[in-house]
């Protein structure tokens, strides 16, 4: 239990999550880690099954193109994640934090947080876009008991 984990993505609110995490890591005097999780949603496939309507050659060609497209999307998502994490690291370093780690994982955020729970002291995450808690709600989760606190932006 020696890290503050900041869960970040490409939303404008990620900057505030970074600032909270920077503040908390300084206050607790522990390592800061930024986490970006790449979700996989195969159930949201945008292509219908046309296998019965296509000839064999056409079907193989289409599947090849779809596979190439999926690979390109995955590479772009990974690169975007690296850039998000690098920007967060630079923000922390500009704020004077020297012990910064970045983590990029594939999967589901909740499962990823459970995986890294043994090394986590505090998790900072922003408001989900569908939240009913209001515009200025942010979350701090204390591990391992997973207690959750709502708070306003830090002032410094």
Image: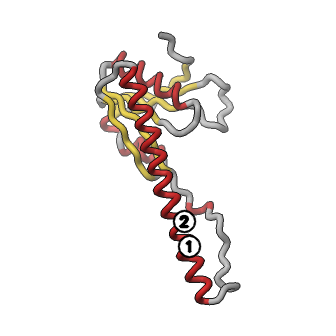
Query: Quarter-wise, where is residue 89 in the image?
Result: top left
Q: Report which residue position mark 2 lands on.
A: 69
Query: Viewer-proximal residue, 56 or 147?
Result: 56
Q: Which mark identifies residue 122?
A: none
Q: Residue at x 62, y 60 (%)?
A: 44
- Looking at the figure, which quarter contains the N terminus? top left
Mark 2 crowdedness (10 Å alpha carbons): few <14, some 14-19, many ≥20: few
Looking at the rendered structure, the secondary structure element under dot 2 is helix
Q: Is residue 72 visible?
A: yes
Image height of 82 relative to 70, above or below: above
Task: Measure the C-alpha gap from mark 2 to mark 1.
Answer: 6 Å
Q: Hey, which residue is sitting farthest bottom in the picture?
A: 56
Query: Viewer-proximal residue, 29 or 9?
Result: 9
Q: How is the image coloured?
A: secondary structure
Q: In the image, is 153 to the left or to the right of 18?
A: right
Q: Report which residue position mark 1 lands on.
A: 65
Task: Look at the numbered discs 2 and 1 and tell me whether their residues touch, using CB distance below 8 Å.
Answer: yes
Mark 1 crowdedness (10 Å alpha carbons): few <14, some 14-19, many ≥20: few
Image height of 30 relative to 74, above or below: above
Q: Residue at x 31, y 38 (%)?
A: 118
Q: Hey, which residue is sitting farthest right in the picture?
A: 53
Q: In the image, is 119 to the left or to the right of 150?
A: left
Q: Is residue 144 visible?
A: no
Q: x, y percentage for residue 129?
A: 64, 37
- Count of number-bearing discs: 2
Looking at the rendered structure, the secondary structure element under dot 1 is helix
Q: In the image, is 99 to the left or to the right of 53?
A: left
Q: x, y percentage for residue 2?
A: 29, 29
Q: Residue at x 42, y 44 (%)?
A: 82
Q: Hey, which residue is sitting farthest top in the picture?
A: 156
Image height of 102 relative to 16, above or below: below
Q: x, y percentage for residue 79?
A: 45, 49
């Amino acid at each position: 239990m020696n890290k503050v984990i900041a869960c970040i993505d490409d939303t404008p609110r990620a900057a505030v999550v970074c600032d909270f995490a920077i503040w908390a890591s300084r206050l607790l005097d522990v390592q800061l880690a930024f986490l970006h999780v790449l979700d996989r949603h195969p159930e949201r496939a945008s292509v219908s099954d046309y296998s019965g309507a296509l000839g064999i050659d056409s079907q193989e060609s289409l599947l090849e193109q779809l596979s190439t497209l999926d690979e390109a999307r995955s590479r772009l998502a990974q690169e975007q994640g690296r850039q998000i994490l690098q920007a967060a690291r630079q923000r922390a370093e500009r704020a004077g934090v020297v012990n910064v780690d970045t983590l990029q994982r594939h999967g589901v955020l909740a499962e990823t947080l459970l995986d890294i729970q043994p090394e986590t002291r505090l998790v900072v995450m922003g408001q989900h876009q569908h939240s009913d808690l209001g515009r200025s709600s942010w979350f701090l989760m204390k591990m391992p008991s997973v207690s959750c606190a709502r708070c306003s932006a830090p002032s410094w």
